[in-house]
Amino acid sequence: LLIGLALGGGALWLYSDAKVSTVGSTGFSNELAVPPLAGSTVRSDGTRVFDLTMRAGEKEFTTGRKTPTWGFDGDYLGPTLRAERGEKVQVRIRNALGEESTVHWHGMHLPARMDGGPHQMVAPGATWAPSWTVDQPAATLWYHPHPHGRTEKHVQRGLAGMFLLHDERSDRLALPKKYGVDDLPVIVQDVKFDGAKFDHGHKTLSDTGFLGNRTMVNGTLDPYKEVGDELVRLRLLNASTARVYDFGFSDGREFALIGTDGGLLEAPTRTDRIRMSPGERAEIVVRMKPGGKTTLRSFPDGSYGDFWSRRFSGGDDSFDVLELRARKTLRTSPELPAELGELEVPDGSDSVRGRFFGLRTSGINGREMRMGRIDETITRGTAETWTVRNEHSTPHNFHVHDVQFRVLEVDGEKPPAELRGAKDTVFVPGNTTVKLAMRFDGQADPDVPYMYHCHLLYHEDLGMMGQFVVVEKGGKAGKVRTPHAHT
Ligand code: C2O
Ligand code: CU
């Protein structure tokens, strides 16, 4: 009922002041913060162990104004975790928030009980220590809380961080890879302040949830970054709760798209724009001239197709996101490789089954999320083709846990370049249909579900989410156990 009300499209005119722009008005006066690489220890059995504490803090985004925040280890956001394919990892999450939460490994292929979804709640004061073996290609993944009904709040207070995977191939390729130097995490969030505090209010019956009036990167307002290499790799993460960005550079320069959510593309693709909805990642490489400058900008986007969709997406809005300043002398970077390797996502030809997901005001296929209900039962080791249709004009996107998928079609057409890599989240504009191919080759567990959902966090919280379990051939879904706190 709630989701029906909120997405029902009433009171649209209240949007009249939703259009914002920071283009040309930004001073780029703050040096970009780069999240530190998380320390780890390696146990005698080879397990790499990380420790993360979720806690409240306060941060001066603007000098002299202390904003109450949440963060992992620090005041806002979290350190960057880094692990190699084949490695066994464990992350010990301590919850010092004073309220229960979870930590989900977005984009990670791992057993359902390690996934950090709404069934793996961590009680205040408790520690949860999931472990798994990294079994997927090099990629830019991320982590964030996933408590049912409260994900938007927990993420926008500051709980998010990157989880980078590397492998033999990515180590071998001549790509920029000096973390914080020519390989930069770029966590983009839109924010709004009310004095020193965050204003997380929604616009009345806001159809997409929170939309801010300025952006920050890695928790830095008006950020600039001085670079000393000819080629700079930006790992873009849209960690906003609802806003869609159409990224490009202020001077229109082209860049190379080298990776999407689940890792590297088969080959770099030249483009001048990339559209990203919440939860999506893209790795791009931009060429700098000695002494030159350029600004990463989010442009107004004309491609949404219909007026309301454009309005709700924030696509009319434009932001100066990050200024890159090149030193007078730059280190020479090797040319980008012509080939990056093969995609490890199915192409739909071996799909044994199709499923349909209709996104509309009442949730997914007419049902809102229920913690105790398993919506889909999938046979381990099989590939499937999922058709996702946005059945109204409000924009949505679609994220599937545990897998990376290939976008086969958008409205019956071959997808644009930015959707041709491994993906775990895909934008589904109003009245649009996407077709996705994926394989479920992890562990079977009939009792613990994975999630699929809209990653506009307000929609997810309202119930635009469903649950699937992976079972052995012929197996049945079990009974979902009530979430419990781990100690
Ligand atoms: Cu990024 Cu189900 O989440
Ligand atoms: Cu949605």
Image: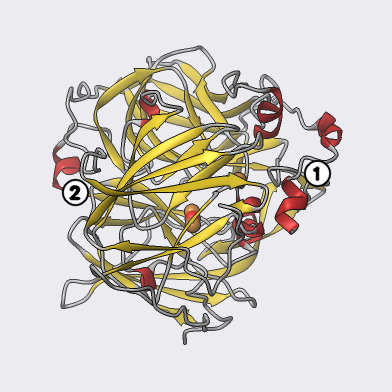
| Amino acid type of the residue tagged 1 in the rendering | Lys
Q: Is residue 167 above or below residue 297?
A: below
The percent position of residue 304, horizontal first and vertical second, equals: 59, 24
Residue 149 location in percent, x, y? 64, 64
Q: In this rendering, is residue 377 above or below 422?
A: below
Distance from disc 2 to disc 1, alpha carbons, whole Å, reads 44 Å
Count of marks placed on residues:
2
Question: Disc 2 on helix, strand or loop?
Answer: loop
Residue at the spot 39% in from the left edge and 28% down from the top edge: 418
Task: Report the front residue among 66 and 440.
Answer: 440
Number of residues whose C-alpha sits closer than 10 Å to that of mark 2, classed few (under 14), some (14–19) or many (20 or more)? some
> Which residue is labeled 1 in the image?
203
* Residue type at tag 2: Asp
* Helix, strand or loop for disc 1: loop
Residue 329 location, quadrant:
top left
Mark found first going from the N terminus, 2 or 1: 2
Q: Position of residue 132 (x, y in %)?
A: 27, 69
Image coordinates of residue 410 in percent, x first then y, are 43, 29
Q: Is residue 200 visible?
A: no
Residue farthest toward the bottom in the current orientation of the protein: 487
Confirm or reject: label 1 Cβ below 8 Å from ligand 2: no
Placement of the N terminus among the 4 image quadrants = bottom right
Residue at which label 2 appears: 167
Q: Is residue 113 left or right of residue 144?
A: left
Q: Is residue 372 left or right of residue 347?
A: right
Horizontal side of residue 446 vs 391, given as left or right = left
Q: Is residue 462 above or below residue 313?
A: below
Instruction: Identify which residue, 312 or 283, lies in the foreground.
Output: 312
Ligand 2 visible in quadrant: top right
> What is the crowding at mark 1: few (fewer than 14 residues within 10 Å), some, or many (at least 20)?
some
